[in-house]
Image (tube, rainbow, N blue to C red):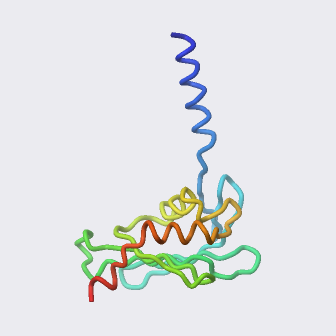
Amino acid sequence: MKNLFLVVFVLFGISISNAQKFNFKKDKVLLDGKEILKNDWEYIGSNVVYHLYDLETGDEIIMIKTDDNSTKNYSDDDYVRIRFPKSDKELEMKGRMMLKAYLQILHKNKVLNDDGSINEIKLDEFIKNYDENISNRRR
């Protein structure tokens, strides 16, 4: 019994220590305490647009725009457009979350690398798996 408890405790400790954590400090995005991106955001009406930039070049690499479909008090039709300007690719997903949640999803799916760069192969897979093409369905 002691051995089983020890194994579970060690595995739990390993899983916690491997979990990567996003934080924000002024205009920087940090992954496990290391600056990986510069960020900026703006409100457009009741929607938020997040801009994420390469630390060295200042080029925008990700733009995340929330859209409430002009239904401020009704959230079932909210969606987000995630655009990758350098690749000229984008996707749309239902729902609306905070920036940290989007970064965690992109990192978990290996689209966003530990150094803040984009993995183009994983980006294509991510778009294929998660794009819901919401704005074209509304027309």
> Which quadrant holds the C terminus?
bottom left
Residue drawn where x is 65% and y is 72% of the image: 38
* Front residue of this view, candidates 119 and 13: 119
How many numbered tags mark residues here? 0
Q: Position of residue 31 (x, y in %)?
A: 65, 57
Q: For this view, does 134 lie left or right of residue 121?
A: left
Up the image or down, 109 lies above or below 138; here it is above
Q: Which residue, as the protein is rendered here, is positioned at the far bottom?
A: 139
* Front residue of this view, candidates 71 and 103: 103
Q: Position of residue 75 (x, y in %)?
A: 27, 70
Choose top left, top right, bottom left or bottom right for residue 26: bottom right
Q: Position of residue 115 (x, y in %)?
A: 71, 63
Residue drawn where x is 65% and y is 60% of the image: 30
Choose top left, top right, bottom left or bottom right for residue 124: bottom right
Q: Which residue, as the protein is rendered here, is positioned at the far right?
A: 56
Q: For this view, does 48 lie left or right of residue 78?
A: right
Q: Which residue, as the protein is rendered here, is positioned at the far top?
A: 1
Q: Position of residue 23 (x, y in %)?
A: 59, 58
Residue drawn where x is 37% and y is 84% of the image: 45
Residue drawn where x is 61% and y is 69% of the image: 121
